[in-house]
Image (cartoon, rainbow, N blue to C red):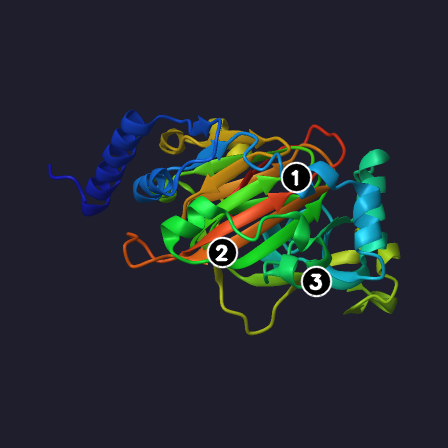
Amino acid sequence: MAASPVAEVRSALQDLVTTYHELNGAYIDELDEEPSALEFMRSVAQNRPFVVRKGAARWPAVQRWDYRYLIDKMKGSSVNVAITPHGNADAVVTAADGVRYFVRPYEVEEPFADFLSYVQRQERDGDVTSNVKYAQTQNDNLREEYSRLFEDVKEDVSWARIALGRHPDAINLWIGNSRSVTALHRDNYENIYCQVIGQKRFTLISPVETGYIEEQSLPAATYLSAGPKGTYGLSEALPEVKYEQLVVTPDMNSVPVPCATLDVSKLDQAGQEFHQCRPIQVTLEPGDMLYLPAMWLVLKVFKQCQQLTLKSYVGTTKSLRRAGTMAYVVQSIIGRSEYCRSNLSQF
């Protein structure tokens, strides 16, 4: 009896993934020095990530940034802050009605000093019930709202700029603590992450394994603060917003959002089909750099509190096999915890 078309496709996919694993393995290269532009282009062509240990160790940001330095440099500035109950901004969440949504964070403008103090205090006190605050905008924020810190990092990564033929399209800085988690996702960019303070763990899944990430289109929603008498709206006293006051609120007339729903932490407990998916885990220390190719899936978890990440995007040239851009990221984390993270795109 002939196999059904679905079974044939499934078998072909399994053969492809098996062959990919045999050729590449569940690991990435770790370099002791930065690659040349030619060496980098080879990795781009192969669509394989790599780590450069201490590649950014001499940057002023890695050598200078700490709590007091950042407070002094950003004195009087306000920044965009994403707030969630569990630290999972832009993530799949099951709401009280039992429906799964792709939920965006509650966003506010807040004095930088208040934000950084909150993040540090939450980590120091082991607070696991209060809302989690995370600076995670991706609008070239290091050259905009964090411009006072820009002089402490390189304006580009030379080997990436030379290889791709242009400067970064955007450079982003992310700040959070060990409860800040970036959900499994993918970017259309070539990304370079640079760790400034603390540690950050990445879980990476190759685009070849996309068929095993349980991608679904889910309705969109946003965390909102519960106002007086159960109404919903923006809170004026953001630092005082309590854990139970943020609620998942469906977006009206929104288009369903395609997103990965696979719980990587429970991969070994999943059905046999999902054992084909072999995530790669890598932890960045201060001064480390990670190249993450376009379309790779990533999950990020912070192992140490306060983290600062810088990310820059550089448009690809016609010689590349896929559309997208390159991202350059610097990240800083202060504090310690047992949390881990996996990433698909950002800082």
What amino acid is at disc 3? Answer: Glu
Give the x, y percent position of residue 215.
43, 49
Q: Please, what secondary structure does the residue beneath circle 3 have?
A: loop
**Which quadrant: the N terminus?**
top left
Res 103 quadrant in image: bottom right
Q: Residue at x 84, y 44 (%)?
A: 68
Q: Residues within 10 Å of mark 1 (few under 14, many from 20)?
A: many
Mark seen at residue 196 = 1
As measured in the structure, the alpha-carbon distance from the residue carrying label 3 to the one carrying label 1 is 18 Å
Label 3: which residue?
A: 145
Q: Residue at x 63, y 48 (%)?
A: 153
Left or right side of 66 for 167: left
As measured in the structure, the alpha-carbon distance from the residue carrying label 2 to the one carrying label 3 is 17 Å
What amino acid is at disc 1? Answer: Val
Residue closer to the observer: 55 or 6 = 55
Label 2: which residue?
A: 313
Tell which circle, 2 or 3, labels the residue nearer the N-terminal end: 3
Give the x, y percent position of residue 49.
42, 37
Q: Residue at x 46, y 27 (%)?
A: 30
Tell which circle, 3 or 1, labels the residue nearer the N-terminal end: 3
Tell which circle, 1 or 2, labels the residue nearer the N-terminal end: 1
Residue closer to the observer: 14 or 41 = 41
Res 287 quadrant in image: top right
Give the x, y percent position of residue 17.
29, 34
Q: Please, what secondary structure does the residue beneath circle 1 have?
A: loop
Q: Residues within 10 Å of mark 3 (few under 14, many from 20)?
A: some
Q: Does 151 sit above or below residue 254? A: above
Q: Residues within 10 Å of mark 2 (few under 14, many from 20)?
A: many
Res 199 quadrant in image: top right
